Image (spheres, rainbow, N blue to C red):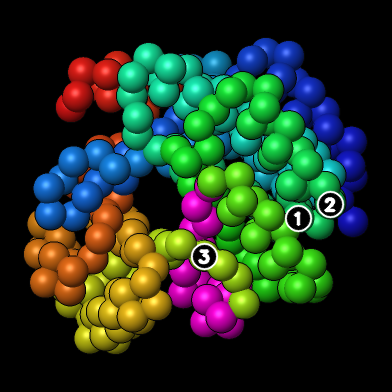
Amino acid sequence: MADPMVGQKALDRANQEKNLLLVYQPIHEARTRRIYAAEALLRQRRESGEIREASVITKAAEAGPEMFALDSWAVRTAFAEAARWHAKGAAVPVNVNLSPREFQEGNVFERIEKLVAGCGIDTHRINLEITEMSHIEELERTNDVLIALKTLGMELWLDDFGTGHSTLSHLLHFPVDGLKISGDFVKGIVTDRRSRAITRSLIALAHDLGIHVVAEGIEREEQLDLLLQWNCDYIQGFLFLKPMAGQEIEKMLLAGE
């Protein structure tokens, strides 16, 4: 069993030294390549100045409750930064990840509603990304929470669809507006027949359900060419832009780039 103090000490140290930060990776419209949204990603700044997913996050995940503290910090920070951008005229939506622990801890709607009121953000410019929902046993209660979140004006997206514990039943049970196809599939679509078939089928399925679709992990023009043939709505990956600091993307968005 993991020692809870390991994760707590790592988190305390990161907070004290202000090592935790969010970076943002743009999501582009597939055909125009214009920035559609920016996804908030949790990172740690090392003493060397390097920014990466780091031990504080891994240790907190092992400890359990501390991961919830990290999740809450990330959501609160993303809302506050996005509200600042929007107030300055950058109307690009921000995608914020909600982990299963956010739902398991309870009161997720009340906490999100309080954060929205506190920072004054336009909820129509927030997309909540949810992952690994099959870990949540009370599907009916979870569905009620998701419906309530949608009443705030937010869109709900399934992240990393097709891997881990994500299933087609999520599209049946939950009121989602979009899904993100995992880069594990996208990276193989040029050379692998199965990856190509699965990705093409998921895009077609999403469109039949009236759901937006993002392809993740794009690194090659050949991948983009296929995704355009299949009418993928949005794209995300190093072919376009890598994750960047909040101030950097804010400057880019305000410049209309």
Instruction: Give the left or right position of residue 15, taking residue 162 as reference.
Output: right
Residue 237: percent from left, percent from top: 28, 49
Q: CA distance from mark 3 to mark 1?
A: 16 Å
Mark 3 vs 1, N-terminal side: 1
User: Element at badge 2?
Assistant: loop
* Near-viewer residue (89 or 215): 89
* Near-viewer residue (254 or 57): 254
Question: Marks 1 and 2: in contact by CB < 8 Å?
Answer: yes
| Mark 2 nearby-residue class (10 Å; few <14, some 14–19, many ≥20) | few
Residue 59: percent from left, percent from top: 73, 42
User: Element at badge 1?
Assistant: helix
* Near-viewer residue (11 or 199): 199
* Magenta segment boundaries in residue numbering: 154-172
| Mark 3 nearby-residue class (10 Å; few <14, some 14–19, many ≥20) | many
Q: Amino acid at mark 3?
A: Val
Q: Amino acid at mark 1?
A: Phe
Q: Amino acid at mark 2?
A: Gly
| Residue drawn at (47%, 69%) of the image | 161
Q: CA distance from mark 2 to mark 1?
A: 5 Å
Does the stretch in magenta take in 100?
no
Closer to us: mark 3 or mark 2? 3
Question: Marks 1 and 3: in contact by CB < 8 Å?
Answer: no
User: Element at badge 3?
Assistant: loop
| Residue drawn at (27%, 55%) of the image | 234
The answer to whether residue 20 shows anywhere in this view is no
| Residue ID for mark 3 | 176
| Residue ID for mark 2 | 106
In the image, residue 141 above or below residue 168:
above
| Residue ID for mark 1 | 103
Q: CA distance from mark 3 to mark 2?
A: 20 Å
